[in-house]
Each structure stands twice: as structure tokens, then as C-alpha cells.
Amino acid sequence: MTTLPPGTTTRRPVIVWDLVTSIVLMVVGVVLAGILTFAAFFLVFASDPCGGSTVCDTERMGIGFFVALIGPAAVTVVAIIAAVVLLVLRRISFWVPIVGILLAVGVWVGGAALVISGVPGATF
């Protein structure tokens, strides 16, 4: 039986495949959040039929636009922070960026759905 000298603790070993996978997925998440943020600017075209004969719910459309604009970046930042914390604690963390990517896309789709629901008769 081996004993450790006083004052030393055992730490979990670094899991290299998890570290590399997590970093690659975090980079993919940041790129995807940038693409979704850029795509959110095109949601303003949903307001083209609004005007004379078509009355749109501009408040709902505005809220949906800001959800689609800011939401993916916010979700990605939270996922990166959570993944880094798990990496520091040397726990398996590759799943956190995957969940973050899926949630970012879901938030963007939810924001786009809000924008489109503000236009009467519009569908995806």
C-alpha cells in the first residue's frame, strides 16, 4: 500500500480526447452563434407585407428579432463557461457544447417563429 506525503492530494488525470473535442465543439459553437446572429438581421424582411392593408404585431416581431439576435450568443457563452468549469474540474465536458449548439439553434428558431407569428397569414 502506498501512502501520499502529507499535504498532497490526488487529482483526476486530464482526458485528452475530451479536452480536444470540447475545444473544437466550442469553436464550432462560436462560429454557429455568429452565423445565427448574422441571419437574424434578415428577419426584418418579414415586415415587408406590413403596412396599408396588413396590420402586423410589431411588438411581437421586435421581441422575436431580439431573441433571435441575442439568444444564440447568450446560450453559447453560458455553454462555454459551463464546459470550461467542467474541464477545470477534469470532468467529461464534450456534451456541454453540443447541448449549447442545439439550444442556440432552438432559440434562434423560436425568435424567428415569434417574428413570423407577428405577420398575419405568414408561415415558415
Image (tube, rainbow, N blue to C red):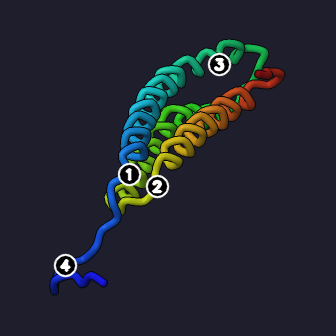
Identify whether 71 is placed above or below 51. Answer: below
Q: Residue 47's mark?
A: 3
Quadrant (top left, top right, bottom left, bottom right) of the C terminus: top right
Give the mark, 3 or 1, whose residue is nearer the N terminus. Answer: 1
Residue placed under numbered mark 2 in the picture: 92
Give the mark, 4 or 2, whose residue is nearer the N terminus. Answer: 4
Residue placed under numbered mark 4 in the picture: 8
As shown in the figure, which amino acid type bears the numbered disc 4?
A: Thr
Q: x, y (%) of residue 30?
A: 41, 33
Q: Are marks 3 and 1 in contact (CB under 8 Å)?
A: no
Give the mark, 3 or 4, whose residue is nearer the N terminus. Answer: 4
Give the mark, 1 or 2, whose residue is nearer the N terminus. Answer: 1
Q: Is residue 66 left or right of residue 17?
A: right
Residue at the left extreme, as displayed: 6
Between the residue at mark 4 and the residue at mark 2, the CA separation in whole angstroms equals 24 Å
Q: Is residue 120 left or right of residue 31?
A: right
Q: Quadrant of residue 12?
A: bottom left
